[in-house]
Image (spheres, rainbow, N blue to C red):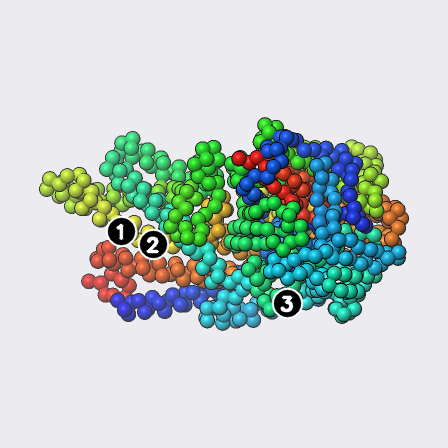
Amino acid sequence: MSMQNFAVSRRALLAGSAGIATLAGLAACSGGGNDDQSQGSAAPAGDGTPDEVQEMNLVELNDLQTLDVNDIRNENEFEVLSELNEGLFRTFTDEDGIDHVEPAGCEDYEVTDDGLTYTFHLRDNGWSDGQPVTAQHYVDSILRLCNPDNGFSYAFLAEDIAGAAAYMNGEGAAEDIAVAALDDKTLEIRLANPIPFFLAKLSNVCFDPVRMDLINEYADTMSNDWEKQVYSGPFKITSRTLENSIVLEPNEHYWDKDNVKLQKLTYTIVTEDATRSQLLSSKELDSVDCSSEYVTQWAKLADQGQLVYNKKADVGSDYLAFNHHTGGPSGLMNNVKCCLAISCCFNREDFNNTALSGLNLPAYGLIPGGILSGDEEYRSTYEEPLHALLEQYDTPEKCQALFKEGVKEVTGSDDVSGVELLILTQQQNTQSKNTTEWLAQQISAGVGVTVNINAQSETANFVAERDANNYDFYLMGWNADFSDPISYFDLFATGSGYAKFMGGYSNAEYDEMYESLKTMSDSAERTAVYQKMEQNIIENAGIAPVYYTVRHNFTQSYVMNMSFPQFGNGLEVSRAYISGKA
Amino acid sequence: MVKYALKRFATMIVMLFIVATATFFMLAAVPGDALTERTARLPEDVAARVYARYGLDKPAPERYVITMRGLVVGDFGESIVFPGQTVQSVIAEKGPISLRLGFQQVILGVGIGLILGVIATVRKNTWVDYGIIAFSILMVSVPTLVFGLLLQQVFAGTLGWFPVIGWPSGDELMFGGWEYTVLPTLAGSFGYMAMYARLLKASMSDVLGQDYILAAEARGLSKGQIVRRHMIRNAAIPIVTKLPMTIAMCLTGSFYIETIFAIPGLGRYYIQAISGRDVTMVMGFTVVIAAMYMVVIFLTDILYHVVDPRIQLAGKTSR
């Protein structure tokens, strides 16, 4: 899951559908007219022969807060810890940018006919200290993840494992969690319900194996000390300067070490796009994502053949979260008509082109393109539900009339002259300022009332204002944890742990459908329920869709075999190498 | 003198106590804490366990007593955001980096600033003087961030003379790897150049009108002799007393320069700690920095007396 509204965005995991999936064709069929492309110097700088020097430089916005896979929280941690640890699966992309989930820590696996029991056969892999990776290390990881004393953010991903939810709620015991090492190389996991996307969840870094012998020895001092850590993945850390850089070198005990060609991989904290730009120009930075106005500048470099521009639909959805907790300072946000009028009164294409420099895609639904439901791409099964509403409320007059009706239902009077709405925002840069001001102006004109801005510069202050319900609505973003629409629908069930972030939508019909999913394993049935749930939340204006995110990556043309998975670690470099850098 | 030093030392202890107390309660008063986001979507009882682990479940007065007890014995506690890190370990790792960057900036900035100040005074009311003053105003007005990015773009990006980012490490930590230090040193020294050029010019101009300068001229001393023997010496008081504070300031690091050039110094860490509400680290840093400033102010007072014996230390009877 990923909250994009404030702080660092947490790019979520992971991939595939039930089984070792190929997310073939998703990019092409995702909604909203995605124009995924790779442009610029398509021809590689070299002839594909690896250079003698195999060093790669990447950047992060913030330092890692933890090296503990169970405690993983942020996008930067996913990127680095994925290269340091080996889960059961690893995702690569092909030359068309399509995700392929490959067996990694496991060679193969079986699922029982009832869809409840998974048996994984592990391959011979080694920790960086030479110890073999065993099934018990995976078991320990799951038990530790679920331990409520640890309070790990991603523990919820394990809740489908039989006995896990009760243990996490403090009602059960660790011994009751249905996970076992049948022998050193065989791992068995039994589910409470046969959910079809369990493997997609299990591919998250938070399930990667852990070494309890070291965790017990070093306790809390281990989580951020690279010298006390051991690594089961392609690389190990060989030096680290806090809040500055992390250097990785190959793990000689890694099972697939022959395919790891990079000899040195350095992540440096560089926050300024201007500095990143200089690094790109001087070839001191090999690959970077961008969401600012620098996209245009770097795209020109790509046109000149200096960079390769990978533009790809992301799995992020940004929307207005209305304050359903209290109705907001205006008292109107629990009225469907008021929220619906706001949702219909502004032009999403204009918003994307004006406030976001055309870098993303206008959204008319909750679920972005590229998310699978069963084997089908969800967005292609169901037209975005807001389109029909926009046809109904297609003029400012109609929106204003609808808003007035809503106000009358709440206050008894259709006089909106004294009505003021409050939009909360965390303004960290010019773009967030532009987006908020654009929305405030357009919504003000659209429904004919004053829209004030409650701007906070610091995350903590934003959170305080949000928790004090001092807003009518704000722009919120979310990236799916894994490829299933439930990753979004989870957010809006009554009593959800996410309610605090998401405005607190609560609807009995929605909740009933959500509950029915818990024991529903048929993908077609699930898809039909998802469609109704999406219709429910859009028509009742639980949220107002605004845009789907698009990823803009720029990579040097001498970098080969880089993967840009849509889910999971966004920058998979374990098989990448340098050819023709000169 | 000893009595004076003891008295000042006692005052410093009281001041540190006040600074620590004020910092603690200000941090307690601002919204949010280091665990707000991390625990926000955990079940309530699980979140409570996380808070309990870091002691943040206790009421502020109780946390205050625990914190102050730790401060007295030099135990600032562990970072909440970066488990395993302590104030001491961070200062040991990052202190030398900020120290070197700061010293280089001060030496270059103050050195050139003083030279410019002398030239501006000697060539008063000429285009040289006006040029130096214009330069100073420009240097003071343009933010460090802009200088840093500009230097980086021209000398590292376009011309490729220096690395874009980085800082010497290992054997070169304190001496060597100069190519990494040139741009950050320059970017941070412009402000000092401007400040000291204007300061010296102002104080020398005051001296210029004094009778003893007139007398020196009457004695037939050359302009160079007058500047060296009389003007600089007498104009040095504001410089000498300002300098220790400048050094103290630069040791605490520079957020912008460290951010632009990816330098692993204290400045960025401190700001990040404040922003992330890493209370233990902020408390520790603040107390250490406050102590450093107090020592510097004490030294400055002593320097006043050394530079101009006519200035009496507080507590002594003036004649």
Q: Depth check: give the residue in front, B113 or A439.
A: B113
Residue pointed to by mark 2 = B244
Taking A91 as reference, is A388 left or right? right
Crowding near the residue tagged with mark 2, few <14, some 14–19, many ≥20 C-alpha atoms within 10 Å: some
- Secondary structure found at label 2: helix
* Front tag of 1 and 3: 3
Residue pointed to by mark 3 = A213
Instruction: Locate residue A83, reporting x and y percent.
Output: 63, 50
Q: Are marks 3 and 2 on the same chain?
A: no
Q: Which mark is residue B237?
A: 1
Q: Which amino acid is tagged 2?
A: Pro
Taking A229 as reference, is B244 left or right? left
* Front tag of 3 and 2: 3
Q: Depth check: give the residue in front, B193 or A210.
A: A210
Query: How far is the residue under mark 1 from the one under mark 3?
Result: 63 Å
Crowding near the residue tagged with mark 1, few <14, some 14–19, many ≥20 C-alpha atoms within 10 Å: some
Q: Are marks 1 and 3 in contact (CB under 8 Å)?
A: no
- Secondary structure found at label 3: helix
The residue located at (70%, 44%) in the rendering is: A92
